[in-house]
Image (spheres, rainbow, N blue to C red):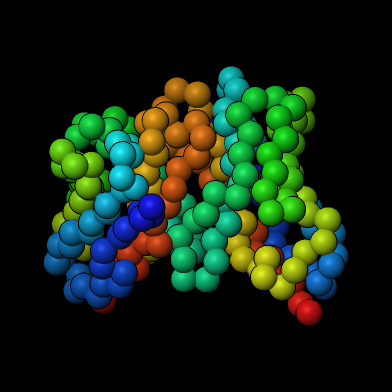
Amino acid sequence: GDSVTQMEGPVTLSEEAFLTINCTYTATGYPSLFWYVQYPGEGLQLLLKATKADDKGSNKGFEATYRKETTSFHLEKGSVQVSDSAVYFCALKKTSGSRLTFGEGTQLTVNP
Amino acid sequence: KAGVTQTPRYLIKTRGQQVTLSCSPISGHRSVSWYQQTPGQGLQFLFEYFSETQRNKGNFPGRFSGRQFSNSRSEMNVSTLELGDSALYLCASSLEGTGRNGYTFGSGTRLTVV
């Protein structure tokens, strides 16, 4: 079945460091891919998305490129801030069907 | 515009009881999905409703049920609560029903079963 695998966490960085959170997926066809972020005590917020191969999603300095050949959708940010501390979830949605399949989440802590 | 509203935010129930959670989607959104989030299992899909019809269902026992009203508001019901049902229950809505552009999530209902 469909699945999403994220790099193991937690990840701890200093402010202004470069961030990469790896995400790979297993699915047939061409799913849509998403990154969601969850702040403490809150629900999920859509961070960015890509709906076809080679698409680059971007938002608030975060970027991720849909790589069909490596079935990956790695999240990157050039300079993280303390306010980026949260749990990040990679997710996919098949073209047919409505459910999101999530990865296990990666806890990011950014220290000043 | 208002986001996805879930009520209540917190709930404590006793094993064996039943519970109903409510979700009001963004105005105009016709698709509502429910997810369960636990530390052990992560985020798991429960079911999705579109125009009052259940379109998709996850792998949960029949104790978990839901419905959607004509105004797109949705309720989720869990009967005969078990300790393992303690979780954050998240509702998400989508405008076009395909979710291709992502879903907007509510802040969730934290259910504790004692």
Closer to the camera in the image, A70 or B108: B108
Q: Which residue sits furthest top? A: A29
* Outermost residue toward the bottom in this view: A112
Percent of width and height locating residue A11? 74, 65
Residue A28 visible in the current orientation: yes
Residue A34 position (above or below residue A41): above
Q: Nearer the viewer, residue A9 or B98?
A: B98
Q: Dividing the picture into quarters, in which one does residue A92 lie?
A: top right
* Residue situated furthest front in the rendering: B1
Residue B45 x/y as whole percent: 39, 44
The answer to whether B112 is drawn above or below residue A4 in the figure is below
Q: How many marks?
A: 0
* Residue that appears at 71% across and 30% down: A55
Q: Is residue B48 visible?
A: no
Viewer-proximal residue among B1 and A105: B1
Q: Residue at x 34, y 47 (%)?
A: B26
Q: B39 left or right of A15?
A: left
Left or right, residue B20 beside residue A56: left
User: For this view, does B10 lie left or right of residue A23?
Assistant: left
Kindly identify the residue that appears in the image at 46 percent across and 71 percent down. Answer: A41
Please tell me which residue is depicted at 78% across the width and 79% down the height of the picture. A112
Residue closest to the eye, B14 or A53: A53
Above-or-below relation of A9 to B113: above
Question: Residue A60: x and y, percent?
Answer: 69, 54
